[in-house]
Image (spheres, grey):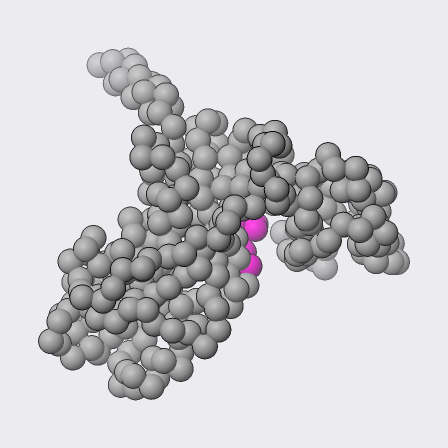
Amino acid sequence: MGNSKARKSVANKSRVEQQDQVAYLGPIGTFSHLVAARRFNTDVQLVSRPDIASIFDFLIEFPTAQAVVPIENSSGGAIYDTVDLLIAHVGSIHVLEDISLDVRLALLGHQDTEIRRIYSHFVPLRHHRNWLSTNFPRAKVLPVNSTALAAQKASLLPHAAALASPDAAPLYGLHVLQFPIRPETANVTRFFVVGQRMRGKGANTKRWKTSAIFHLKNTCGSLHAFLGAFARNSVNLRMILSRPIPGSPESYVFMMEVDGFIEDPQVKKAFEKASKWCEKLDLLGSYPSRPRYTASKRAAK
């Protein structure tokens, strides 16, 4: 009996692995889901995962799978859950593509009811703080793990609403009460497509970026010298951030992103020179940067 169940489990896993899979941060209706659905063909199996850690676990279990994960928001900054997991899985999980989304939010809720609670992810709540305080000064504002979860929660309470994608409204039986909600500043979220299998450079892709993880030597001026290698080779540094190393107080690992493909002569030379100031340097990937997506153009109704 036990052997039969084991064989069935292996067979089921084999069938799943035969189909192209793309994991995303769920539930259905998140902006990660929207980006994954737009980027990949309909014959790809989209797999919802409850958190970013479980997405990386999924990629380890299914080596041919890919995933869409948020990496940065223009107002909230870096998504450190993703950064830390990229660092933890360096060498096995690679960045394959860079996708940006111009986020446009809607107020979702129930018609003809007083709004007493408004749910959303903490970044949209911060981004639309003035709008919320002006239009709903008495409503309780409640952060949750995703905008789709906000819609899900709002659907269960008659006096609740959510700041979420308008595409989430029909998924959770809500109405689009207002769209778009205009923030004071632009709201753009960047996503990485990640997976175990690195890709070569495509002939038709004009814009490339390269990311790496590095540990500096503990010497005076090492960071200055490291960055100088890129400046001297005219390689534009787009992003650099540091993360503490667990179990090593006052020690840090860095993540960086530059313009260009790793085999471009200037980029290759810059990394070769910079690596002399590192204890360790690992490439996360060289990847194309796709044109920015716009969220939804759905009208309020």
Q: How many marks?
A: 0
Q: Residue 17 or 289: which is nearer the viewer? A: 289
- Residue at point 37% right, 64% down? 104
Judged left or right of residue 237, residue 234 is: right
On the image, which quarter does residue 144 sit in?
bottom left
- Residue at point 32% right, 75% down? 141
Q: Is residue 101 above or below residue 58?
A: below
Judged left or right of residue 195, residue 218 is: right
Outermost residue on the front side: it is 204
Looking at the picture, how far across and down is residue 136, in whole percent?
Answer: 28, 83
Residue 83 magenta: yes
Q: Quadrant of the C terminus?
A: bottom left
Judged left or right of residue 81, residue 252 is: right
Outermost residue on the right side: it is 220
Q: Is residue 25 above or below residue 221?
A: above
Q: Quadrant of the N terminus?
A: top left
Judged left or right of residue 48, residue 268 is: right
Q: Which residues are magenta?
A: 78-85
- Residue at point 35% right, 25% down? 19
On the image, which quarter does residue 36 sit in?
top left
Looking at the picture, how far across and down is residue 60, in whole percent?
Answer: 48, 32
- Residue at point 15% right, 58% down? 173
Whether residue 290 appears in this view of the structure is yes
Residue 46 magenta: no
Looking at the picture, how far across and down is residue 123, in whole percent?
Answer: 43, 67
Whether residue 95 appears in this view of the structure is no
Q: Is residue 103 above or below residue 248?
A: below
Name the main secondary structure of what is drawn in magenta: helix
Looking at the picture, how far across and down is residue 147, in whole percent?
Answer: 33, 60
